[in-house]
Image (cartoon, grey):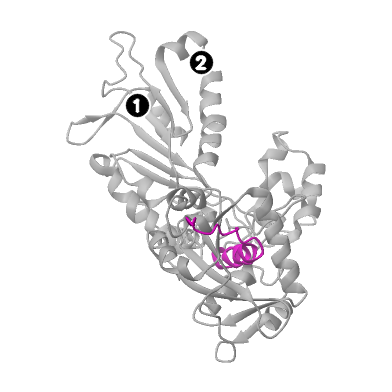
């Protein structure tokens, strides 16, 4: 990100055809909030510290609003006009296909690329390419990330790594540049004398050896080696399966679809939307007719979210409660449906503390054998997601949604159980006697 920005400080970009364009760059991270935090800390603060207050006030304009964060630079000393084409701008945006599309840019950075699935990465790149517009051949798209144990061959980062290494091996010198910082073959994690060679932050006194030793204990050897030294685990083995939910508990919960039917009117349904636009899921929950406990079934799972509102209106007459996580994309759905005549009266907007309680309750019920799941159309999808599901850290945990493998069916099932247990009181229609 630094090189094109440094170039922009010297003025706009002159293309081969003689046309002069301002430099316009865009930067993203896992989400818009993270992107803004990184933008302010890693870019704005260093630039501000490198300039005198007079130069900063004269040549730089900073917008700090959450939805409009940008840095505009105009080196002109007279005739100052921020609308002048010579002014250059870098801004932050949300890592979604719709946000990537837009005005022509000269530089686009995807940070924290490890969070995207292979499909999401392909979609983002397809949307990003045309934004280079008139700067094509001069513009750049950068994809940056550390490595994690979750980056298997289904993730965008793994795809980037295999393609990048292939380019290096082919000897290509145009089109794409690939940089990878990792350890040499035969690296011994136990030999701490080599750590400063592969992790420059130690020699630069940014982090201390005792802090690394503590992180190694906390993360475990495999995760520590990936996060700090760029050690890639093998393809197909990077996502640790059945570490949060045991395979025994899951197998015990499954029941063949032809042996047990879900009632036409389920007591509650849960809805979850993946934060990276990888789809959404709906799960139905009711009392188990054969034993003391709950019976659940994933009844819908699709790409995108445009279909959700209509689908919920179809299901609303047959359910008593509809639970949605009242945060992020889920909050937008709550706002959209809270005044709906069919869905609104049955809608439960689950707040942060209740979501933590819902995760704990669902997990405990599954382990205790108080939950059964029908093996119907979307059962295989849920099994793949629950096998790889992770937990967030802290005193109050919840299922982690930000991994390479989505957790939308798991969260929808968690919310469905919460809906069943917290059905809103139904107010009878008023009558005049």
Which residue is the site of mark 2? 51
Q: Position of residue 246 (x, y in %)?
A: 73, 74
For the image, the number of numbered tags is 2
Q: Is residue 4 above or below residue 347?
A: above
What residue sits 64% from the left and 83% below the top? Answer: 254
Looking at the image, residue 214 sits to the left or right of residue 284; the answer is right
Q: Is residue 25 a member of the stretch shown in magenta? A: no
- Helix, strand or loop at disc 2? loop
Kindly identify which numbered label has been placed on residue 88. 1
Q: Nearer the viewer, residue 128 or 357?
A: 357
What residue sits 48% from the left and 57% below the top? Answer: 431
The reply to whether callout 1 and callout 2 are in contact (CB within 8 Å) is: no
Q: Is residue 315 above or below residue 114?
A: below
What residue sits 40% from the left and 33% below the top? Answer: 4
Looking at the image, residue 254 sits to the left or right of residue 213; the answer is left
Where, by quadrant of the figure, is residue 294 drawn?
bottom right
């Amino acid at each position: 990100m630094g090189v094109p920005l440094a170039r922009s400080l010297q003025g706009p970009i002159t293309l081969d055809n003689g046309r002069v364009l301002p430099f316009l760059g865009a930067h993203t991270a896992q989400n818009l909030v993270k992107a803004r935090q990184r933008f302010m800390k890693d870019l704005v603060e260093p630039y501000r510290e490198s300039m005198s207050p007079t130069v900063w006030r004269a040549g730089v304009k900073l917008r700090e609003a959450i939805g409009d964060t940008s840095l505009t630079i105009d080196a002109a000393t007279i005739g100052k006009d921020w609308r002048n084409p010579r002014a250059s701008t870098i801004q932050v945006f949300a890592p979604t296909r719709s946000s990537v599309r837009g005005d022509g840019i000269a530089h686009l950075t995807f940070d924290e690329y490890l969070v995207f699935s292979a499909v999401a990465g392909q979609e983002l790149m397809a949307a990003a390419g045309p934004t280079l517009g008139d700067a094509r051949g001069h513009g750049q798209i950068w994809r940056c990330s550390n490595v994690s144990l979750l980056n298997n061959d289904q993730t965008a980062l793994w795809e980037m790594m295999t393609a990048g290494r292939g380019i290096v091996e082919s000897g290509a010198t145009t089109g794409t540049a690939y940089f990878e910082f990792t350890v040499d073959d035969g690296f011994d994690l136990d030999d701490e004398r080599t750590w400063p060679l592969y992790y420059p932050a130690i020699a630069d006194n940014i982090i201390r050896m005792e802090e690394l030793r503590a992180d190694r204990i906390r993360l475990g050897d495999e995760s520590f080696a990936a996060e700090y030294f760029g050690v890639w685990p093998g393809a197909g083995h990077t996502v640790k399966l059945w570490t949060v939910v045991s395979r025994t508990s899951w197998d015990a919960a499954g029941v063949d679809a032809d042996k047990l039917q879900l009632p036409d009117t389920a007591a509650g349904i849960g809805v979850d939307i993946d934060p990276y636009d990888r789809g959404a899921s709906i799960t139905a929950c009711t009392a188990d007719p054969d034993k003391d406990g709950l019976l659940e079934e994933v009844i819908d799972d699709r790409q995108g979210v445009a279909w959700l509102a209509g689908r919920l209106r179809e299901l609303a007459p047959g359910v008593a409660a509809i639970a949605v996580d009242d945060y992020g994309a889920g909050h937008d759905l709550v706002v959209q449906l809270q005044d709906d005549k069919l869905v609104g009266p049955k809608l439960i907007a689950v707040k942060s503390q209740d979501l933590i309680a819902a995760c704990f309750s669902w997990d405990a019920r599954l382990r205790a054998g108080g939950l059964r799941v029908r093996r119907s159309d979307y059962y295989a999808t849920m099994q793949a997601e629950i096998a790889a599901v992770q937990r967030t850290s802290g005193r109050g945990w919840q299922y982690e949604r930000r991994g390479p493998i989505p957790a939308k069916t798991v969260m929808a099932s968690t919310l469905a159980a919460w809906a069943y247990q917290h059905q809103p009181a139904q107010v009878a229609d008023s009558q005049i006697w």
